Every structure is written in structure tokens, then in C-alpha cells.
Image (cartoon, grey):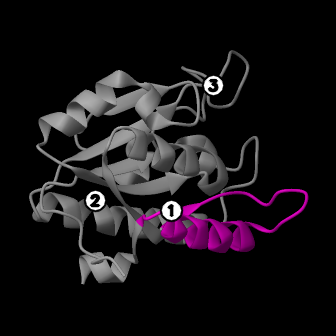
Amino acid sequence: MPDTVPSPAAPLIVIDLQTGMFDGRFDPPIHDADAIAERTRRLIDWARHSGRKVAFVRHDGPEGDPLAPGASGWPVWPPLGQAADEPTFGKKVGNAFSNPDLAEWVAGQGAGDVVLIGAQTDFCVAATVKGAFAEGLGVTVVSDAHSTLDSLEEKAPDIIARHNKAFAGQGVRMATTAELVG
């Protein structure tokens, strides 16, 4: 079993925790939205206090989509408390590393690994895990700080549990918020 502690330089990458994932205007909020927001704030504080950098990834949906640039659901969820010096990287597909600026930013941190949290477990988080591996990075997923919506076939808690097991099987370092934050 790999060590649960990411390297000291590993940045925290917050994936698609945008207003549309929380406000319920167009879709239901992600599963356990309030707890996800609270854990995210704790992890952001942990990252800042441990000298790690924090980056936000924002999905840029097509025109007319709740996550389209300029739409009400598009901004990073303000209660997360993104600092002015914490960058936001846009993307149009699931893998956050499809934006080469993110890979360049991570490399600029001197990091060989990343810590991933966010939404949605079965889409953008899973695709970003694969993208980080393709970049040659080690990956830590915070098992209780990513979420999704119910699908027609499966409830969100089951999707999250299934992906946590799959991530571990792919060689992802798994940790809980409490294990990292203390």
C-alpha cells in the first residue's frame, strides 16, 4: 500500500467545483454538496499552510450550457474562497491536463505528483487521473472530497465508492481529508 502522504510540492487541483455543481438552478447539486464544499475549504487551507500551491479547473461548457463561459453556473463556487493568486485553468473536455497550461503550471511547482479533488467523479475526476498519469505524475485522490450526481443506473455514493476502488487499483494514492489535514 502506497504512503498516503503526497510529496511536499504536490499542488492541490480543485476540479470543476463551479457554481452549477452547488446551486441547484439547472441540475441537482452534486451528492453531499455541503460536505464536499467544507472538505474542499479544509483541504485548500491545508495546502496553503503546508506551502503547496492550489489551482482551480473550470469546465467551459458549450453555449447554452449552465457551465458555459459567462453562464450563472460557470464561476468557481465563491464559498470555496479561491485566492486572487490561485490560477484557474479552463477545459472543454474531461481531462484537466487537456489544457497544456495546467501541465506547465504543475511542472513549475517542481512537483512529480498532484492532489486531486472535485467533480464529477465518473467524468472529469476520472479523466484527470488518467491525464495526470499520462503526464508522468503521481496522483493522490482525496477519497471523500470528490463527488458526482446519480446516474440512471447507479446512485452517487455507489459511483464514488466504485471509482475510489478503481483509482486505488490504477496505482492512485488514496487519502481522506482527515488523513491529510489531521
Asked if residue 165 lies in the magenta stretch, the reply is yes
Could you say where residue 54 lies in the image, as x and y percent from the top left? 25, 48
Could you say where residue 103 lies in the image, as x and y percent from the top left? 30, 32
Circle 3 residues within 10 Å: few <14, some 14–19, many ≥20: some
In front here: 155 or 122? 122
Q: Which residue is mark 1?
A: 170
Query: What's the amino acid at mark 1?
Result: Gln
- Decide if residue 51 is on the left or right side of residue 145: left
Mark 1 lies on a secondary structure that is: loop
Spatial CA span between label 1 and label 3: 28 Å
Query: What's the amino acid at mark 2?
Result: Ile
Screen quadrant of the C terminus: bottom left
Q: Residue at x 52, y 42 (%)?
A: 18
- Decide if residue 133 is on the left or right side of residue 87: right
Could you say where residue 77 lies in the image, as x and y percent from the top left? 47, 46
Residue 106 seen in this snapshot? yes
Mark 3 lies on a secondary structure that is: loop
User: Can you tell which mark lies on residue 44?
Assistant: 2
Asked if residue 137 lies in the magenta stretch, the reply is no
- Decide if residue 58 is on the left or right side of residue 1: right
Spatial CA span between label 2 and label 3: 25 Å
Q: Which residue is mark 3?
A: 61
Q: Do labels 1 and 3 touch, CB within 8 Å?
A: no
Q: Residue at x 41, y 25 (%)?
A: 99
Q: Which residues are magenta?
A: 145-172
Mark earlier in primary sequence (1, 3): 3
Q: Residue furthest right?
A: 152
Mark earlier in primary sequence (1, 2): 2
Query: What's the amino acid at mark 3?
Result: Gly
